[in-house]
Amino acid sequence: MTLYPPTGLLDVLELEVCWESDLQVQVGDLVVPIHRSVLIGRRSQFLTDLFGSEFSGSGEPIPVNPPHPELFLRALHSITTRARPELTENEFVGFVRTAAFLQSEELQARLCEASLANWRSLTRVRTFKNPAVPPHFLEMMLLMAREREVMTASEALEVLAAWCSDDISGGTHVLEKLVAVQELDAAELTRLQQLNPRFVELLSSVNVSDHEKGLGQLHLKHSSS
């Protein structure tokens, strides 16, 4: 499935760099000029920090090692032209990782928007896990989906539970942003624990004194399973 552009239009994507710059990075054998607007507008904190406050070119390209070199130029093109990124469903997590590498809030926001119509299938992709999808991005995505009413609170918690099945680090902060944990009933807590037995560890990190008894019961159930 293609997210952007519509299905069938993404057979071969050959981007042409249509600007010149003395600021350059090198990805493998590819030398890529960096438009100064990216640095001035802080559309990529990584690149802004890389070239320094004066944005002075050294004459030699600076080597960088993005997690997905094959997606780097397309991600850079998106933040330079401020266009929606062109990507397929299978490329989504790679783009998320590239946006995190570039430290681009702008690109991450566009990726969140791209995910809204297809969030069910995207979040079931095998690689949609922590830490490949960073906690900060997951938080942004789930809050945007809730704000635009394309996802219920229960569905957002399901996504969180599946995302942190291998690694719960950072999950507590996302959980606290999503719901008031004190208001979760026992049936919902039990359901989430069934989806991910480690979900109870997130709950135990949240200050929910009114729920201590319920959490204790869940811990006993978790220990006996």
Image (tube, rainbow, N blue to C red):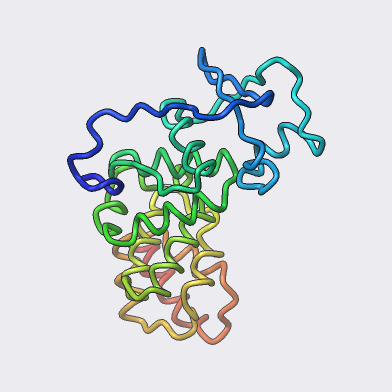
Residue that sits furthest to the top in the current view: 29
Which residue is depicted at the point 49% across and 27% down? Answer: 17
Which residue is depicted at the point 43% across and 61% down? Answer: 141
Which residue is depicted at the point 63% across and 20% down? Answer: 63
Residue 123 horizontal/vertical position (percent): 31, 54
Q: Quadrant of the N terminus?
A: top left
Residue 37 horizontal/vertical position (percent): 64, 42
Q: Is residue 8 left or right of residue 113?
A: left
Residue 12 horizontal/vertical position (percent): 27, 28
Residue toward you, 92 or 9:
9
Residue 164 location, quadrant: bottom left
Residue 117 vs 81, above or below: the answer is below
Residue 121 horizontal/vertical position (percent): 24, 53
Which residue is depicted at the point 34% across and 56% down? Answer: 115
Residue toward you, 156 or 6:
6
Residue 145 vs 78, above or below: the answer is below
Residue 149 location, quadrant: bottom left
Residue toward you, 212 or 92:
92
Q: Is residue 95 left or right of residue 43?
A: left
Residue 155 vs 136, above or below: the answer is below
Q: Quadrant of the C terminus?
A: bottom left
Residue that sits furthest to the left in the current view: 8
